[in-house]
Image (cartoon, rainbow, N blue to C red):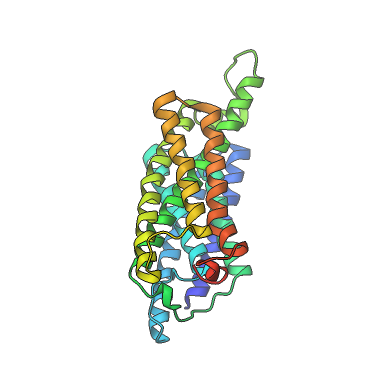
């Protein structure tokens, strides 16, 4: 059994989980929702084993590094962190329907990694030969995953809020909307997810600066990756500032969360794939 085979199993588990969640939306059958969660957890368990196995495979090949170094490995790890954060939200707050809006992010990542990226294990380039790699990637991607969950919850909020606005009679929501948490709960989940992600992103930037000093002799060089990381940080800092000082909640907070995640994805993928700089090796390496 190889890590690639287990990653394929993970992808299938996330796909089945998403299908069950969509069926849960359509039928409101709680058993389907439970099945979606359990399949997501099973996929997470298999993926955890696969990541550990890939790490071992790199040592068997004489390369010997954590599986976080190239685009394939980072996308796989990103998907893992998304399901990990979802599991925390699901177990703590018991709103299973959130999975229908979060698991697809993890599935898209795994499907892209398995079908469109080079999965080979290669030696680290000199800039990546540091323990800072582990600290930086883990903190950043846990933060990114929390922002992905916040984005999914924000989409739910906008759908629910629009439905309530269209329901001029003020009657209680029926059908699909009855399965959504109240808007105040969705708004609070959005805030809580960002409160998880923002400190992690901050730690990611700090460890990235330390890593940059180790690799290139400077803490900050206004490289496109660094600049976009700072932009993402400012977007979420603005979210928290507006919430604390001006009471921003509801639609404005939801839209800012979605904008923040779009900036996050560009920081992660757009900069690596389309812009040049110290991180230009990111088209194949992180």
Q: Position of residue 100 (x, y in %)?
A: 56, 44
- Tell me where residue 47 sits by quadrant: bottom left
Q: Position of residue 97 (x, y in %)?
A: 52, 40
How many labels were placed on the picture? 0
Can you say whether 12 is above or below 236 in the image? below
Q: Position of residue 155 (x, y in %)?
A: 58, 37
Q: Residue at x 37, y 68 (%)?
A: 217
Q: Residue at x 49, y 65 (%)?
A: 74
Q: Position of residue 114 (x, y in %)?
A: 58, 68
Q: Viewed as shown, does residue 223 lie left or right of 275?
A: left
- Tell me where residue 171 sits by quadrant: top right
Q: Nearer the viewer, residue 193 or 243?
A: 243
Q: Viewed as shown, does residue 33 lie left or right of 213?
A: right
Q: Name, please, the residue furthest toward the top.
A: 169
Asked whether the viewer can see residue 32, the reply is no
Q: Residue at x 45, y 78 (%)?
A: 125
Asked whether the viewer can see residue 84, the reply is yes
Q: Nearer the viewer, residue 150 or 14?
A: 150
Can you say whether 246 is above or below 79 in the image? above
Can you say whether 256 is above or below 75 in the image? above
């Amino acid at each position: 059994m190889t890590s690639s085979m287990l990653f394929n199993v993970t992808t299938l588990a996330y796909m089945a989980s998403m299908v069950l969640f969509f069926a849960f939306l359509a039928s409101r059958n709680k058993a389907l929702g439970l099945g979606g969660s359990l399949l997501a957890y099973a996929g997470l368990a298999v993926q955890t084993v696969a990541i550990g196995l890939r790490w071992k495979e790199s040592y068997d090949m004489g390369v010997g590094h954590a599986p976080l170094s190239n685009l394939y490995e980072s996308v796989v790890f990103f998907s893992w962190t998304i399901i990990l954060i979802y599991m925390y939200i699901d177990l703590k707050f018991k709103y299973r329907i959130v999975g229908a809006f979060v698991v697809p992010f993890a599935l898209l990542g795994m499907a892209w990694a398995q079908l469109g990226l080079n999965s080979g294990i290669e030696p680290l380039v000199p800039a990546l030969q540091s323990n800072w790699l582990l600290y930086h990637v883990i903190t950043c991607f846990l933060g990114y995953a929390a922002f992905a969950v916040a984005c999914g919850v924000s989409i739910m909020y906008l759908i629910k809020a629009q439905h309530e606005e269209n329901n001029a009679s003020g009657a209680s929501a029926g059908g699909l909307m009855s399965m959504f948490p109240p808007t105040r709960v969705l708004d609070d989940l959005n805030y809580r997810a960002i409160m998880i992600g923002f400190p992690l992103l901050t730690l990611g930037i700090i460890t990235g600066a330390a890593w940059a000093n180790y690799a290139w002799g400077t803490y900050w060089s206004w490289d496109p990756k660094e600049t976009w990381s700072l932009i993402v940080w400012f977007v979420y800092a603005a979210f928290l500032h507006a919430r604390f000082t001006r009471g921003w909640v509801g639609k404005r907070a939801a839209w800012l969360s979605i904008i923040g995640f779009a900036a996050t994805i560009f920081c992660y993928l757009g900069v690596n794939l389309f812009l040049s700089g110290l991180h230009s090796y990111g088209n194949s390496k992180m």
